[in-house]
Structure formats: structure tokens, C-alpha cells
């Protein structure tokens, strides 16, 4: 008999208990992104003081344990006096959802933390938090454990100046990983100094004993120059730095048209990165597009036989947009998207007239933008025509266009189907014999594939191996990508466990990142982990991924054991039954799922290591040379 559902089954969670029970609602998750979000919440509060003219410097410290952080500013200091609730204002702010000084514009004209949730959420998800406040010539302190006060607000002595210092240690029972990434912190803090021109942030990394003094008087102009260098882009048209105030909104904009084929916009609202865009980005795109279309019409630049789309006109555009709004409406506590309807019209109305005026005053540069858009339109038309030649029909249609080397599966539901992209015909033969024919398809590749970072789209489509991959997947690529045509929702890269195999895997990942990125973003791409060694002890077999894994297995064997070790020269050497048992069988295999947590960093890394400029690879090799213990040549 089913259990009855009654009023007694309703659980009410309040305050800190609600945050600890459902942390994802407040910080987005309990992985590394959520861990770092704790720090961003406290840093954003300090930046709010600076943004409103009350602070000029911030010090962020990563302590020796690699998990405890401190954020100190020289702002006004959180109030410590008694609140109407009968508790200290400091305790109210750090333990009450929502509570804060940013719900009206009397204390902060603009701020990144408006929900009154950030600091208290950090407190709730920390095993320990210590607040030290300087104001009114005194220093005050209060300690918390898992969001609950352990001490009263105590006066600890006289103080010079004012400010707030928050030190917290993330709770290991909440987070999957509590070790902070120092380079990620440094990069994010440097971005804050670009967005808050004149602000100085000192990052003290006590783990590595390094100190970074971050300060950029040039603001977004400096940021754009650094981004151009990181992405290895060359400017084809430089626009002046743009700043405007309209309807109580401050707009800062830095734009270059580059020789790259990709458009990129980095946007921020009150210093918060809006990675999912929003109404400010919509307004910007519309302003730039309308301005260019007006310029084309006024100067009679429309090409014959070519239709210029929005993507063509914005191709190669690299933009940094910063908006300061007195009452931003974010989507979710993690503030990834701006939803204010008024911002769209405000940005459009402010940017478009200034952009049009600049185009008319600098007609040669305006014509250069239009000319590259025409080239982009022609290239797009050629790419579409080429893509149509290799695009496969949907999974339910005829299979006559599939690559000849593809051993397809009988199942037609993409959710149940796997495609193994295998190195070499020999390994492909073993995989075809050992696979589950109902759900597992095998596509062998011949040798190393084309480096997509250094090749044009036309050359990529003409490459037989990559063309076979696109045809087998069935979803198209680039602008023609259609997920509803995807034939497999698990694509597994299966290469030999040696340097050549790793190189082929890297080449395929480069191609997928540049032209089929949605497959990575949706979690469809995996890397198989075939064993390099088989260790037989009597009738028992152990499988080692690499030399280190082999040594661990040998170290755990009984002292009298006499292991027989076999090293596989390649997947083709494995009998089909062994390949299925170790690498194909969903119950026993080991897979690595490819994740994309930081697209900008991934973009930079691929450009550095796979691009045409060898200097970045040389620097990477030289920097890591001392760490290499075994070189496979």
C-alpha cells in the first residue's frame, strides 16, 4: 500500500538550512565553478564599494592550504550597530536571506550584488567564516561556523582607516573539490581592474608565495588589447573607446574588427560577467548592425548577387561591453544573463548614433568592414554548397550516403547509439568484430587527420577523413549545425595509448571545438581509455592504462606473485573479445567525458598549441621541459 501524502510530509527550510540543502540554487553547483563563485560573491561586494567611490584597493589572499580565502577592502566597512531585529547589522547581513544595503539606491548607485543573498550564501557554505570590520576608529570581529554565529560581534581594538575583511573556508561536506585554481583567480581579478578603471587589486598567493599587483588605468581599452594578444588576433579596423550615459545607465564599449572569422562579445553588468548575454548584448548587436546597414545604404555599397546577413557584417568583431545599471534584473543568483527590457533600447539608442557618425567620418574604415562582410558572405555561400555535398540525410532516411568505412549500428534512436572513431583500419577491424552491433558504430580513420586550426573550411570539407566524420554524424557543421539530425549522442574517440594516439585525439578535439562545439557543450564527446598493459596473475587479469597505473597494480600484488606483463603496441593487436571487455563494454570500460568549463581559456590554448605561430608551442615546451620524465620519440 502506497504511503499517504499528508501535511506532515511538508518540510520548511529557512535561512542557512535552505542554502546548505540546495546550494545549486544559490551558487550554480558544488563543482569548481560553484567553489569559485563563493570567492566572486565576496570580491563583488568589495568591488561595489570601489564602483561607488568608497574604496580604492582590494587585497585577495589564497592561504597556504589552497582552500581558505580572504578578501579585504578599504571601503566604509559593514555596519556593526544594532539592527531593528535586535541583532548586529553585520550578523543580519551574513545570516539572513535576503538582507543587505543594496535594495535602494541611497547607499549604492550601482552594484553587482542586489539580492542580499551572496554573503550569507558564502557563510552558509563555509565550514568557517571570520568577519573583521574597521569603522569609527575601532576594529570589530565575529566568527561563524556553517552559517551560524559562534561568537558575538566583539570589539578587538582600535583601528586606523575603514574597511571589511572576510576570511572563509569552503565546507568539504558540500563541495566536490575545495582546492582553488590560483590562475583562474588572478585572471578574474585582473578583469575586475579592467572594468573598474583605477582600482588596484593585490592577489597574494601564499601557496606559491607569489604576489600580483593588478592595476589598469586604461580600462576596457587595455582589456581589449590584452584580449587581442591572447587570442592572437590582428585588428583590421580599430574603433575608438566609447563611453556614454543614458537613462541612468553607464555604457563602456571597446570594439575591434579583426582578421578572425569568429565574432566574440564579452559583456559585464556592474562588474559581473554575463556569460549568457542578455538585453545589453541584444541592444549592442542591433546598434552595430543597424549602423552598418545604414552606412551601406547611404554609400551604395550593397554588392550585387550577395545578401549580407547579420553574421557577415559582425564576422571578426571582438567586443567588450560593460554596463552599469542602478537596478539590474539578473536571471538567477549566479547572474549569468541580464533581463532588463529597458537596457536593450538604451544601449541601441546610445551606441547606434555614435557608431554611424564614426563610420561616416571614417568612411575608408567603414568600407573595409563592409568589404570583409562581402567576403564572408561569399565564403558562407561556398561553404554551404560544399557542406550540402557531404551532409547526410536524417537517421530515418536512406543510408546510401554514409561513408564506406562506417560499420553502422542497427538502432536508429540517437540517444541509444554510440559512434567510436577509431585509429587505423586494423583497430577498426577488431572493434567491428568486438562491438555490440545494435548500438555501437565504428568509423576507422587513416592516420593523422588534418589540423583544423591551420586549415580553411574548404580544405577541411575536402579532407576525406574529416568529411567522413561529418557525414557519419549527420548534423552538419558550423553555421549549418542541426542537433536534431545528429545520429549518435555518444561520440567516443578511441586511439592507441601512445603519443601518436594522443596527437590524433588532440587533432580531433581541435576540429570538434572549432566546427562542432555544441557536441562538446552538450556532453556528447568522450575519450576512451584503452589499456596499455595486461598483467596476468594466475587466472586473473589486470589492465593498466599507463606505466604509472602498471606500477600501482604491481605494488598491490602479493609478494609471491609472478605476473606476466603484456604491452599492447596498438589497439589492432587486441583480440576483439579483449577490446570489447576493456574498452567497448559499457559495464567495464573507462571513459573520459570532454567538458568545456572555460571556453575562452580553451580557445586560447587551442590557438597557442595548434595554431600557425610556433612561438607559443616553443614556449609551452620550454616551460614544461623540466617536468618531463619520459619522452616518447
Image (cartoon, grey):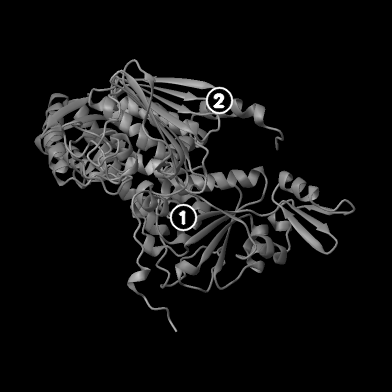
Q: Disc 1 marks which residue?
A: 523
State left or right for residue 266 relative to residue 169: left
Question: Pointer 1: residues within 10 angstroms few (<14), some, or many (20+)?
Answer: some
Give the x, y percent position of residue 11: 36, 63
Compared with 582, 455 (above or below) is: above
Q: Which quarter shows the C terminus? A: top right
Residue lying at the far right in this picture: please name it: 560
Expressed as whole percent of the image width and height from the top left, the position of residue 546 reads 71, 47
Q: How many other residues sit within 10 Å of disc 2, few (<14), some (14-19) or many (≥20)? A: few
Is 505 placed above or below 619 here? below
Q: Any mark on residue 147, and which?
A: none
Which numbered circle lies on residue 208? 2
Based on the displayed image, in which of its 4 quarters is residue 56 positioned? top left
| Residue 618, horizontal then vertical, whole percent | 57, 27
Inspect this view and state whether residue 597 appears: yes
Which residue reaches farthest top?
160
Q: Where is residue 108 in the image (x, y as percent from the top left)?
A: 20, 31
* Count of marks overlaid on the render: 2
Determine the image quadrant of residue 224: top left
Q: Along the line of sight, which residue is nearer the eye, 394 or 283?
A: 283
Amino acid at each position: 500500500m502506497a504511503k499517504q501524502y499528508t501535511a506532515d510530509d511538508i518540510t520548511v527550510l529557512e535561512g542557512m538550512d535552505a542554502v546548505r540543502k540546495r546550494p545549486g540554487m544559490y551558487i550554480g553547483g558544488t563543482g569548481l565553478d560553484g567553489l569559485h563563485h563563493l570567492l566572486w560573491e565576496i570580491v563583488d561586494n568589495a568591488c561595489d564599494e570601489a564602483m561607488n567611490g568608497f574604496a580604492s584597493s582590494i587585497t585577495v589572499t589564497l592561504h597556504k592550504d589552497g582552500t581558505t580565502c580572504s578578501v579585504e577592502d578599504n571601503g566604509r566597512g559593514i555596519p556593526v550597530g544594532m539592527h531593528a531585529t535586535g541583532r548586529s547589522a553585520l550578523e543580519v547581513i551574513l545570516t539572513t536571506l535576503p538582507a543587505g544595503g543594496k535594495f535602494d539606491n541611497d547607499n549604492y548607485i550601482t552594484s553587482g550584488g542586489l539580492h542580499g543573498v551572496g554573503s550569507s550564501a558564502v557563510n552558509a557554505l563555509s565550514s568557517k567564516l571570520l568577519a573583521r570590520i574597521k569603522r569609527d576608529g575601532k576594529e570589530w570581529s565575529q566568527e561563524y561556523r556553517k552559517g551560524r554565529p559562534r561568537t558575538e560581534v566583539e570589539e578587538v581594538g582600535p583601528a586606523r582607516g575603514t574597511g571589511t575583511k572576510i576570511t572563509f573556508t569552503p565546507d568539504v561536506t558540500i563541495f566536490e573539490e575545495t582546492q582553488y585554481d590560483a590562475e583562474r583567480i588572478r585572471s578574474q581579478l585582473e578583469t575586475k581592474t579592467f572594468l573598474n578603471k583605477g582600482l588596484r587589486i593585490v592577489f597574494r598567493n601564499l601557496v606559491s608565495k607569489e604576489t600580483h599587483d593588478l592595476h589598469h588605468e586604461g580600462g576596457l581599452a587595455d582589456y581589449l588589447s590584452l584580449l587581442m594578444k591572447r587570442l592572437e588576433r590582428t585588428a583590421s579596423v580599430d574603433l575608438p573607446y566609447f563611453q556614454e550615459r543614458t537613462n541612468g545607465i553607464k555604457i563602456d564599449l571597446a570594439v575591434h574588427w579583426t582578421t578572425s572569422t569568429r565574432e566574440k562579445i564579452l559583456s559585464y553588468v556592474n562588474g559581473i560577467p554575463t556569460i549568457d548575454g542578455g538585453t545589453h548584448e541584444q541592444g549592442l548587436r542591433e546598434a552595430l548592425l543597424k549602423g552598418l546597414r545604414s552606412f551601406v545604404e547611404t554609400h551604395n555599397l550593397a554588392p550585387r548577387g550577395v545578401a549580407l546577413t547579420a553574421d557577415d557584417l559582425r564576422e571578426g568583431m571582438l567586443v567588450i561591453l560593460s554596463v552599469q545599471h542602478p537596478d539590474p534584473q539578473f536571471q538567477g543568483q549566479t547572474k549569468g544573463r541580464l533581463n532588463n527590457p529597458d537596457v536593450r533600447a538604451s544601449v541601441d539608442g546610445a551606441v547606434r548614433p555614435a557608431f554611424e557618425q564614426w563610420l561616416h567620418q571614417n568612411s575608408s574604415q567603414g568600407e573595409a568592414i563592409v568589404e570583409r562582410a562581402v567576403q564572408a558572405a561569399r565564403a558562407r555561400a561556398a561553404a554551404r554548397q560544399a557542406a550540402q555535398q557531404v551532409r547526410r540525410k536524417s537517421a530515418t532516411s536512406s543510408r546510401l550516403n554514409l561513408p564506406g568505412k562506417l560499420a553502422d549500428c542497427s538502432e536508429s534512436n540517437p540517444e541509444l547509439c554510440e559512434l567510436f572513431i577509431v585509429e587505423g583500419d586494423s583497430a577498426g577491424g577488431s572493434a567491428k568484430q568486438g562491438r555490440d552491433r545494435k548500438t555501437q558504430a565504428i568509423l576507422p580513420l587513416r592516420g593523422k587527420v588534418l589540423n583544423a586550426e591551420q586549415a580553411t573550411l574548404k580544405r577541411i570539407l575536402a579532407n576525406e577523413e574529416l568529411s567522413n566524420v561529418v557525414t557519419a554524424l549527420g548534423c552538419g557543421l558550423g553555421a549549418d549545425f542541426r542537433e536534431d539530425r545528429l545520429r549518435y549522442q555518444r561520440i567516443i574517440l578511441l586511439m592507441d595509448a601512445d603519443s601518436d594516439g594522443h596527437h590524433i585525439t588532440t587533432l580531433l578535439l581541435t576540429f570538434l571545438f572549432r566546427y562542432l562545439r555544441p557536441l562538446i557543450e552538450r556532453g556528447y564527446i568522450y575519450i576512451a581509455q584503452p589499456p596499455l598493459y595486461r598483467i596476468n596473475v594466475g587466472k586473473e587479469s589486470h589492465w593498466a592504462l599507463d606505466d604509472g597505473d602498471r606500477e600501482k597494480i604491481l605494488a598491490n600484488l602479493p609478494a609471491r606473485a609472478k605476473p606476466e606483463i603484456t604491452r599492447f603496441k596498438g589497439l589492432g593487436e587486441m583480440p576483439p573479445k579483449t577490446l570489447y571487455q576493456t574498452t567497448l563494454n559499457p559495464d567495464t570500460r573507462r571513459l573520459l567525458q570532454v567538458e568545456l568549463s572555460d571556453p575562452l581559456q580553451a580557445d586560447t590554448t587551442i590557438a597557442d598549441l595548434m595554431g600557425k605561430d610556433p612561438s607559443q608551442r616553443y614556449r609551452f615546451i620550454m616551460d614544461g621541459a623540466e617536468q618531463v620524465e619520459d619522452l616518447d620519440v
